[in-house]
Image (tube, rainbow, N blue to C red):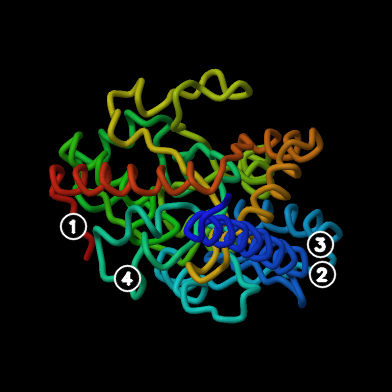
Amino acid sequence: MTDRRTLLRNTWASALVAATGTSWQMAHAQASAWPSKPVRIIVPYPTGGVTESITRLLAERLSPVLGQAVVVDNRAGAGGITGMDAVAKASDGHTLALAAISPLTLLPHLTHTPYDALADFAPVGTVMYSPVLLLATSAFSGKSFDDMIAQAKANPGKLSLATSGIGTVGNIMLEQIKRKAGVDILHVPYKGGGGQLLTDAVGGHFDLFTANPSGNLAGLVAQGKVRILAVTGPTRLPHLPDIPTLQELGHPLANLTSLFGVFAPASMPAEQVQRLNAEINKILAQKEVQDRLSKVDNVASPSTPAQLAAVLKAESAANAKVIKDARIRID
């Protein structure tokens, strides 16, 4: 005979299972119903850069599977802070960002950010890994990285080097090179790595610059309008076997690379984040997408949301230590 307590316990358990099942079904239904309007992906850099290129590639493939238009919105400024802040504060449930992780792992240690880098975003997943190129314009009379260091020592502060902004990977690379070599090179920060920076590079408005690989940049190199002096990464690039890495040149702390990911506001439900992650990873697995990335030296690097979150936390801690130990200051 079943006693009263057993009956109540069984009834409670059955109700819990039913409630849990209902909650899951509701969450699944909500995730399936999303998006209910066009999705906006903010690129926190100017037009014409590698980030915009890959974002448009993802957008055109995400649109049919999500059943809504996916639009790209460039919001350049402050090394990525402006665009990332817009994402952190977005409340429409349909705003994302595709950006390098530096606005979340580097900038908070160098300047004030209007967002909490680790609390205000929901990491969706990594997209690609990109080396950084150190290039020379027609204004630079030298031929190599060693020439750059020699000229900087001979004429402190005369050489100028442009990057995509204050607190970006290029900026940290420059600071590490200056510190290791004991030289003074003028930093010229832009609001992103495409558009105006490349236009000014062709015009010789500065001597040197850093940039992630892109189709536009590859065209300028092929035309001889800019020259590559060094690359970053674990090995030399396959199609540039004669160009050394900064590691080989004796600058291991400057041998930095860029990791790009998709981010949502922290308020986005986990079910929607997981759906986005699954769809983006499917796209990154497509051979055509991988080929288009590899043509400009970028490598598809899918991950789970948890893996990207772990990377952000680890990179932030590592960068904080490097910046403190190197006494890097951003004016």
The residue at the point 62 percent across, 75 percent down is: 93
Label 4 sits on residue? 113
Which of the 4 image quarters holds residue 33?
bottom right
Closest to the observer: 177 or 90?
90
Query: x and y percent of residue 76 in the render?
Result: 51, 70
Name the amino acid, label 2: Gln
Please identify the quarter of the rendering in which residue 15 is found. Answer: bottom right
- Can residue 11 be seen here? The reply is yes
Hey, what amino acid is under mark 1?
Arg
Alpha carbon of mark 3 to alpha carbon of mark 4: how far?
Answer: 32 Å
Instruction: Please report contact status of discs 3 and 4: CB closer than 8 Å, yes or no.
Output: no
Look at discs 4 and 1 and give the one toward the viewer.
4
Decide which of tag 4 and tag 2 comes sooner along the chain: 2
Q: CA separation, marks 2 and 3?
A: 5 Å
Is residue 293 rendered to the left or right of residue 242? Answer: right
Tell me if label 2 and label 3 are in contact, CB under 8 Å. Answer: yes
Q: Which mark is residue 63?
A: 3
Depth-wise, is mark 1 or mark 2 nearer the camera? 2
Residue ID for mark 2 = 68
Mark 1 surroundings: few (<14), some (14-19) or many (≥20) residues within 10 A: few
Residue 219 image point, x, y percent: 69, 44
Q: How crowded is mark 4: few (under 14 residues within 10 Å), some or many (20 or more)?
A: some
Residue sitting at x 74%, y 36%: 285
Spatial distance from mark 4 to mark 2, Cα to Cα?
32 Å
- Separation of residues labelled 1 and 2 (CA atoms): 44 Å
